[in-house]
Image: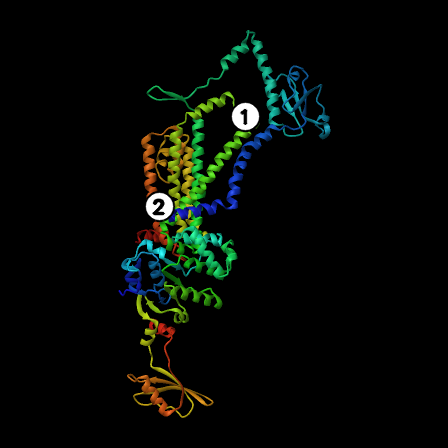
Amino acid sequence: MNKTMLIIRREYLTRVKKKSFILLTLLMPFIFAALIFVPLALSLIKDGSDKTVYVVDPSDHYAPLFQNGGGWTFSQQPQDDAAFYDKDSGVEAVILINGDPATDEQALQIHSRNQVPADLIAITENTVGNQVRQDKLAAYGIDSLDRIIADVQKPIHAITMQRDSDGSSKITNADIATAAGFLFTFLIYMFVMSYGAMVMQSVMEEKTNRIVELMVSAVSPFQLMLGKIVGIALVGLTQLGVWTLMLTAIITTAGQMFGTGGTGDATMMLSALMNLPFFEITLLFILFFIGGYLLYASLFAAIGASINAQEDAQQFMTPMIVIMVFAMYAGLYSAENTNGPLAFWSSMFPLTSPIVMMVRIPHGVPLWQELLSLGLLFGTCLACVWISGKIYRIGILLYGKKPNLKEMVKWIRYK
Amino acid sequence: MTPDTFLTAENIVKRFGTHTALDGVSISVPRGRVFGLLGPNGAGKTTLIRIINRITVPDSGTITFDGHPFGADDVQRIGYLPEERGLYKKMKVGEQAVYLASLRGLSAREAKARLQAWFEKFGIESWWNKKLEELSKGMQQKVQFIITAVHEPDLLILDEPFSGFDPVNAELLKKEILALRDKGATIIFSTHNMASVEEVCDDIALIHKSHVVLQGQVAQIKEEHRTGCYEVVATEGTLKPVEGVFDVTGSTAQRHVTTYRLAKAAGVSNADLARAVAEQVEPRSFCEVMPSMNEIFLKIVGA
């Protein structure tokens, strides 16, 4: 077997066979799903008993309008009583209506021992407010005025379509495009961050273990570095693959259990989702993913090879993290103006482009920009792998010395 | 180049920035012998060893390996035991031995069969499924030696092989090294330990300050560095210096024997010296004091 393949195989198998990896890979989808569904499930569960609210309305105009439900039981009382506010009274709140709420701002009040819950306030305001509005309309003496008003107030909704000069058009949805962009961006960011750091960790481990001298006597340092980067990428892809499959299965099952989906909005969203340039997105996602990972992983490998101890890692890691966090923010702000200067330039700069470009692509990016960005990314990527290979080759065999940038530039020039 | 030379390095130069680690170093390692690579710390030994392992590329100079120019495939025929030992701590012993052997060109099955034979020979079969970090340092050294030799390399490069071994295991290792040599392997042996040089090395090269300052067969080097010192143990009479033959540099008397140290004059043969001594005293023993490798090392390196 080819030596690079042997290295990839070892890097892959030792990680995938680890108990912690298996556990994390299998549990994460459930944790993700729990994050989505547990709050949903909790919100559906109601308190066992309804809470009692007294309504004191001398006019008797509004009190009968309060409907039991939503966890509240309303009951009319002739007058306010201090006993209502006793801890053991079982009364949650008292709604006092003294006078005409239409003209007197002080007329409608809610008294309670505790904070008044927001939904009770909303119920009260809606119930009384609706009646006040109807009373006012009726006072004008115009027939069917309420229906006229309702007709006038009907909201207008614009359907967004993307059209080409050849006349074809399709339904789009900016929110969905943004969400899809963020998802891909976040995936790249997370992947590069965690697996790039894993490459560094692994290089450093070989160096501190001193096995590296034995390794490079059998294979070239470049093979070793490449084998490591590819092997770890495969570990990450395995994890992503398992997560995608499991999450899809869990969400589908759980979605059916909770009975979500299938509303009119959803079909609309689905058609917008289907109309995203999927082939383009997937292809570019894969390309930017590979480019971004290779670029960062090779830099991480070079760092891992240059340092002697975990503590030294920080000083070199910081600039990398700063750049990545900047890219993340640039991506966030680019979503608001996907063709603005920030979005454009940061999707051209190779260290940020894999992250930022993914935000822009679902919104449509001119082909020349995509090609230019990819070209720059892969050009830089090759240069970085080459330079990192040089640094790696010298660095892994150098012990005890803490290198600085000047030293590392010198290593690149060594034959 | 004589036909029985396995490896030659000619005029090797290696610079790191302004520092010259090797400056025109040439060595030739005879086939099927143990070749000692000696030198004080920082002399350039490790750099030379790394060049012979193709870890580092020399700035200039050529290496001939088994009669042809050194190429990338030749590393399959080299077994390397680095001075800084190290294996994957979290990996199982057997698994990583198979992996490292495969990197040296063995098939996985072949590697496993051979390794199991070695493990049996060393009586360590039970370690196969242990993680390396569970073994003691000495045990790890054994595993590492097996990994070095398992692909039956034609050239073994051992950097301080005895460090970290107890005397019993050092003896075992020495036997294995000599057995490998007798099977036809060529061995480059780098060490500071001059006693082990005398025990196992057939030839040596001494590197000092980036240059080879001494090279040849151990016996011949000792011959060349004869100091003309003799030790005579005599029972009767008193030994006096004889002009033009020898001088007495010291003596110690113990009850009825006296030990004399003599310095022979130039151009006198051992036979003449023995005769001259026997004329004066009754010798019980007569021997030439050969310099130890340690003394030669110190003399040349100038400590």
Answer above or below: position of B254 versus A20.
Answer: below
SS at mark 2 in the image: helix
For the residue pair A361 and B1, the one nearer the viewer reads as B1
Q: Give the crowd class for mark 1: few <14, some 14-19, many >=20 residues within 10 Å.
A: few
Answer above or below: position of A102 versus A195.
Answer: above
The answer to whether residue B15 is left or right of residue B251 is left
What residue is shown at x 47% (from left), y 89% (from top)?
B255
Image location (x, y in percent) of residue A53: 67, 23
The answer to whether residue A250 is left or right of residue A346 is right
Residue under circle 1? A260
Chain of the residue where label 1 is placed in the rendered structure: A
Chain of the residue where label 2 is placed in the rendered structure: A
Residue under circle 2? A385
Q: Amino acid at mark 2?
A: Val
What residue is shown at x 61% (from left), y 18% (from top)?
A128
Do the residues bearing badges 1 and 2 touch, measured as CB atoms within 8 Å? Answer: no
Image location (x, y in percent) of residue A222: 36, 49
SS at mark 1 in the image: loop
Q: Earlier in the sequence, mark 1 or mark 2?
A: 1
For the question of whether residue A405 can be seen, the reply is no
Q: Amino acid at mark 1?
A: Thr
Quadrant position of residue A197:
top left
Q: CA distance from mark 1 to mark 2?
A: 48 Å
